[in-house]
Image (cartoon, rainbow, N blue to C red):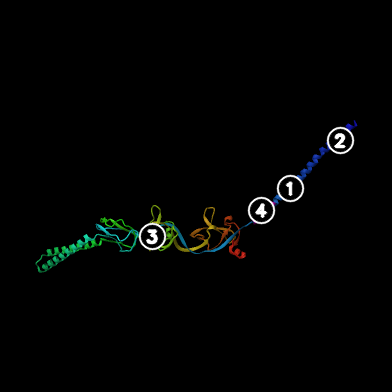
Amino acid sequence: MRRSTLIAALLAIAVGAWLASPHVGLDRLLANGDSEAAAPAADTGAADRDAADTGAERITAVRTRGSVAEPMAREIVLNGRTEANRTVRVAAEISARVTELPHSKGDLVAAGDLLARLDPREREAGLAEAQSSLARRELDFEAARQLGERGFQAETRVAEARAALELARYHLRRAEVELDHTALAAPFGGVLEALPVELGSFVDIGETVAEIVDLDPILVVTDVPEARIAAIGRGDRAEIRMVDGRRFEGRVRFVARQANERTRTFRVEIEVANPDAVIPAGVSTAVAVTLDPVPAHPVSPGILVLDDRGVLGIKAVGGDATVTFHEADIIRAEADTVWLAGLPERLDVIIVGQGFVTPGQAVAATDEAELTARLGGPAR
């Protein structure tokens, strides 16, 4: 009995202790939990404020280069093609056999050089006959005139004799011209581009005997869009760039005043000296027409950027240390330099970091010249 009572008492004590312990532990846990939850919240707020302060103070660093506009001749680059200055087809004016061809196709000939000779024998005989006929008519007219002065010849007979004399003179002149036509000469200097006859062949009146192409000067022809034609005038200097790398200088000699109805472009002819006919006709070229100089900035093509509208331009730093964007009017382009017009006279152009800043953004700019001075050598 005593033992059972003791066990029961121990169990009651144990149960009581167990019932009391969870409440005490929970209170302590809640107390501790509230304290720990409040502490991180306070720490997070402080971190956010620190981050915000840091972001407000963060300014992108860029490198700039001072640029001053200088006069630069504008340049319009167009596609072109070479053409002969003039081409003539030399045709036979009499019917005869070819007896002489002193030149070969492709030869350079001078004005007046013999291209072909036709058989002159028939024309020589005709000339001799015309000369004889003229001499006879001169005698007839003189006799009729003297008889008329003495009153032994009617005036009508004298007039007939005079008409016969004039006709004889005409036949003589015609015979001389036909004899001259047996020698076909170059009307101007150029290249003997075609020689479609052979020695001994017979040619009729109007048949082509030779074709001469005048390549000095040679013409470079380009079709200029209507938006640019107003800038080009006679006498403007042009550079002709051949596909093989050769370059030649020329001058604009003709600017059309009526557009092509189909392409809405204007024909422009550029005259280029070609004394040795080294520039052939009918080849493609690039034509760079030089216009009057305008103030322009030379920059590297690598610093050109596109704005949100897709417009090509450059970024610079203004007087308030913020980024500005300037649309690029490219007037001349070389291998490592482009010339931009329409910009302020002086600019601090961003040459490093332009891809990481936007117009209106404040930046920390370092001038390239100052950086070079500090480093004691070329800026990198």
SS category of the residue bearing label 1: helix
Task: Tell me which amino acid carries mark 2.
Answer: Leu
Number of other residues with Cα within 10 Å of mark 2, as a class: few under 14, some 14 to 19, many 20 or more? few
Q: Image quarter for residue 365? A: bottom right
The reply to whether dot 2 and dot 4 touch (C-beta < 8 Å) is: no
Mark 2 to mark 4: distance in Å? 63 Å
Q: Are marks 4 and 1 in contact (CB under 8 Å)?
A: no
Question: Between disc 4 and disc 1, whose residue precedes?
Answer: 1
Q: Is residue 170 left or right of residue 31?
A: left
Task: Determine whether the residue tagged by mark 2 lies in a helix, strand or loop.
Answer: helix
Q: Which residue is mark 2?
A: 10
Q: CA distance from mark 3 to mark 4?
A: 69 Å
Q: Nearer the viewer, residue 75 or 195?
A: 195
Q: Nearer the viewer, mark 3 or mark 1?
A: 3
In the rendered structure, which segment of residues is drawn in magenta?
47-57
Residue 219, label in figure = 3
Which residue is disc 4 drawn over?
52
Lower position in the chain sequence, tag 2 or tag 3:
2
What x and y, as percent, mark residue 20? 82, 39
Residue that mark 1 sits on = 38
